[in-house]
Amino acid sequence: MMDLRKKQRAVVDALEDVKGYDIVVYNTAALPSMFERVVIASGDSTRQVKALADNVREKLEALGERVYGMEGAGSGEWILVDLGDMVVHVMHPTVRSFYNLEEIWGGKSIKFKKVTEKIAKKLSRKTPKKPKPRAKAPRRRGKR
């Protein structure tokens, strides 16, 4: 079984791969629930919501994680992906604003560092520092 932090990172990455947005992760370990994390994300259309949920399922199964079920794939407005210790809600923005799950789970969301392309390139390879340009010798005027 995968470490919970790695698992939540894999879920967020899977959602970002399909252009999911307004992604929040809530730590629910202190609450009397059957799971430790709640992830909420939005997609602009029913097709995108389905694609987001499918991508989460596929990526986590590829990593050897068990997906206990998916609910709501028929309508595509709100799909719940049950990962055991983590529940992922992928929602159309109108449905998300109506049900306002953020208020239910409340508290602080977990912050993730965004790895930009520029930072990723720096981390992947160390570029040697460029040597400082040498001062040119002064030009001599006239003949000797």
Image (cartoon, rainbow, N blue to C red):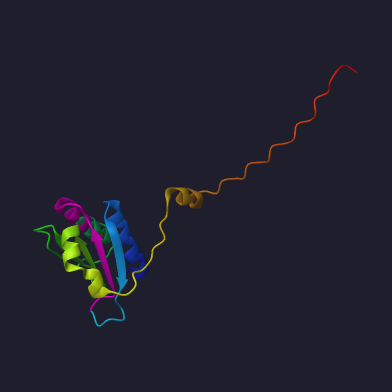
Q: Residue furthest bottom?
A: 32
* Residue 20 percent across, percent down from the top left: 26, 55
From this view, report whether residue 69 is shown above or below residue 129: below
Q: Residue furthest right?
A: 144
Count the marks: how many?
0
Q: Is residue 48 magenta?
A: yes
* Residue 87 percent across, percent down from the top left: 23, 69
Q: Is residue 111 left or right of residue 42?
A: right
Q: Confirm whether residue 92 shows in the render.
A: no
Dividing the image into 4 quarters, which one contains the C terminus?
A: top right
Q: Which residue: 28% across, 56% down?
A: 21
From this view, report whether residue 28 is shown above or below residue 132: below
From this view, report whether residue 71 is shown above or below residue 124: below
**Observer-nearest of 21 and 52:** 21
The image quarter in which residue 27 lies: bottom left
The image quarter in which residue 49 lies: bottom left
* Residue 79 percent across, percent down from the top left: 16, 62
Magenta region: which residues?
34-53
Q: Confirm whether residue 113 shows in the render.
A: yes
